[in-house]
Image (cartoon, rainbow, N blue to C red):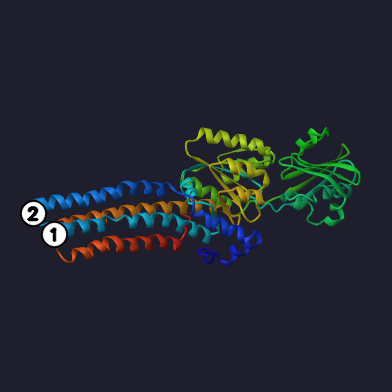
């Protein structure tokens, strides 16, 4: 309930489309994961509390023995106990991270645990998928190339093969097709991640997908070199031809690259698309390196290699079912929540609800604000308590000193809690 008002109408509509109850559950559980700051505070409290109690007792004993004014030093010892109470730190620091999760949700980012804020700050490499992540994933057929037979026959079999597919390419191919006409006649449908589709339609075996799949099935294909995404089709081992689909780069793909580079984050593209397309998009956006024509398991291999060769955390961002294994394996898995598959969203640590790739930078920026707020709270609390402790040593007998001690405890706690809560209303700027 705390986070429901934080979603503006745009993100709320997006979330409703994907299942509001699930997203609320993810956010609600987000604060349960401990951050490094939480662990530090737990250890700090275990040491700090007995130290303060011991300090109060020692001050009382030494002061009483020297001055023989036990009443005054009992009062001073109690003041020190009040001053040293760690409530301000113990409450405000976890609240800063909890507020950061709320700030992220207000900006269309679901972070499943406060511990992932720490991991986001440690990201040194971002590995990204292409289709649906850097590009819109809203393909359109730009060219139909029939090799054996006519275009109508080629499209008819492609419609049949792709009518049950949930992949953006399959949905694009069937955009103008009457799917009910085909779906009831499909048998033995198999969608092979990273390769394509095999099925039986009206007694004929259809293979549709990349050149690699047709080669595995023993169908000779001369790969096309023209720009765009190519889907080949064969029926009963007979090669019919291919269609070319075009896709466009998202407006915020370039800002994502520039902003992350400004933080020293290396960006690597892993895609199942052909090399020419990967090279073009990387050169245009300034992505550091790329690997193309990859199967999901091959993406995992490159991810493992990056994780092995980098001391900092490696994040992976994707949207499809093909990306789910890499999302799970990475140090920080990020999924596109708008168009992303259910399995990718379910297994991601961070979900971007409006599919804006530049939100990756926003998430890191929010994590930085959370850490800065928590560090300020710790430093400010310790400074104030030290100053008031010194005052108590000199003015412990004064009637007003206990009020100052209470302010150093309860007043300081309220002040720092408010500082943590104000994080909810901070602006997330994109500055290089």
Nearest the viewer among 109 and 78 is: 78
- Residue 414 position in % (x across, y down): 34, 63
The 10 Å Cα crowd at callout 1, few under 14, some 14 to 19, many 20 or more, is some
- Residue 273 position in % (x across, y down): 69, 41
Residue 328, quarter of picture:
top right
Left or right, 403 with respect to 42, comes to left
According to the picture, the residue beneath numbered tag 1 turns out to be 72
Q: Is residue 290 visible?
A: yes
What residue is shown at x 66% (from left), y 53% (from top)?
A: 136
Nearest the viewer among 125 and 258 is: 125
What residue is shown at x 22% (from left), y 63% (from top)?
A: 404
Nearest the viewer among 401 and 144 is: 401
Nearest the viewer among 156 and 140 is: 156
The 10 Å Cα crowd at callout 2, few under 14, some 14 to 19, many 20 or more, is few
Left or right, 340 with respect to 382, comes to right
- State whether residue 257 is above or below residue 71: above
According to the picture, the residue beneath numbered tag 2 turns out to be 67
Q: Is residue 134 visible?
A: no
Q: Which mark is residue 215?
A: none
Asked if the residues shown at circle 2 and circle 1 are in contact, with their CB atoms under 8 angstroms apart, the answer is yes
- Residue 230 position in % (x across, y down): 75, 43
Residue 295, quarter of picture:
top right
- Secondary element at image label 1: helix
- Residue 116 position in % (x across, y down): 50, 48
- Secondary element at image label 2: helix
Question: In the rendered picture of this protein, how many numbered marks are placed on residues?
Answer: 2
Seen from this angle, which residue lies furthest left? 67
Q: Earlier in the sequence, mark 2 or mark 1?
A: 2
Distance between the alpha carbons at the discs numbered 2 and 1: 9 Å
Left or right, 354 with respect to 155, comes to left
């Amino acid at each position: 309930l705390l986070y429901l008002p934080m979603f503006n109408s745009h993100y709320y509509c997006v979330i409703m489309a994907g299942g509001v109850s699930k997203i609320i559950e993810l956010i609600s559980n987000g604060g349960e994961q401990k951050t490094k700051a939480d662990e530090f505070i737990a250890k700090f409290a275990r040491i700090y509390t007995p130290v303060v109690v011991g300090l109060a007792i020692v001050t009382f004993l030494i002061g009483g023995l020297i001055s023989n004014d036990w009443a005054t030093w009992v009062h001073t010892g109690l003041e020190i106990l009040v001053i040293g109470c760690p409530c301000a730190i113990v409450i405000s620091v976890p609240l800063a991270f909890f507020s950061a999760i709320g700030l992220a949700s207000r900006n269309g980012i679901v972070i499943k645990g406060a511990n992932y804020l720490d991991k986001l700050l440690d990201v040194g490499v971002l590995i990204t998928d292409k289709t649906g992540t850097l590009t819109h994933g809203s393909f359109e057929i730009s060219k139909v190339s029939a090799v054996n037979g006519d275009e109508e026959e080629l499209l008819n079999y492609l419609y049949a093969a792709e009518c049950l597919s949930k992949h953006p390419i399959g949905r694009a191919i069937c955009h103008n097709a009457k799917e009910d006409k085909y779906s009831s006649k499909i048998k033995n449908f198999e969608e092979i991640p990273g390769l394509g589709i095999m099925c039986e339609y009206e007694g004929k075996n259809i293979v549709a997908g990349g050149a690699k799949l047709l080669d595995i099935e023993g169908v000779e294909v001369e790969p096309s070199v023209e720009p765009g995404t190519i889907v080949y089709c064969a029926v009963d081992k007979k090669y019919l031809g291919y269609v070319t689909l075009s896709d466009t780069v998202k407006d915020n793909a370039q800002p994502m690259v520039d902003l992350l580079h400004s933080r020293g984050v290396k960006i690597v593209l892993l895609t199942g698309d052909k090399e020419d397309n990967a090279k073009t998009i990387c050169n245009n956006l300034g992505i550091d390196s790329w690997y193309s024509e990859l199967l999901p398991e091959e993406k995992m291999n490159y991810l493992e290699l990056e994780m092995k060769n980098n001391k900092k955390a490696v994040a992976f961002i994707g949207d499809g079912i093909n990306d789910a294994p890499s999302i799970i394996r990475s140090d920080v898995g990020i999924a596109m929540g708008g168009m992303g598959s259910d399995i990718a969203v379910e297994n991601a640590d961070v979900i971007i609800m409006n599919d804006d790739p530049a939100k990756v930078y926003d998430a890191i920026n929010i994590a930085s604000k959370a850490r800065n707020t928590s560090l300020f709270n710790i430093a400010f609390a310790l400074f104030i308590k030290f100053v008031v402790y010194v005052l108590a040593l000199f003015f412990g007998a004064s009637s007003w000193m206990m009020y100052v001690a209470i302010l150093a405890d309860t007043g300081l706690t309220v002040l720092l809690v408010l500082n943590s809560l104000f994080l909810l209303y901070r602006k997330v700027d994109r500055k290089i």
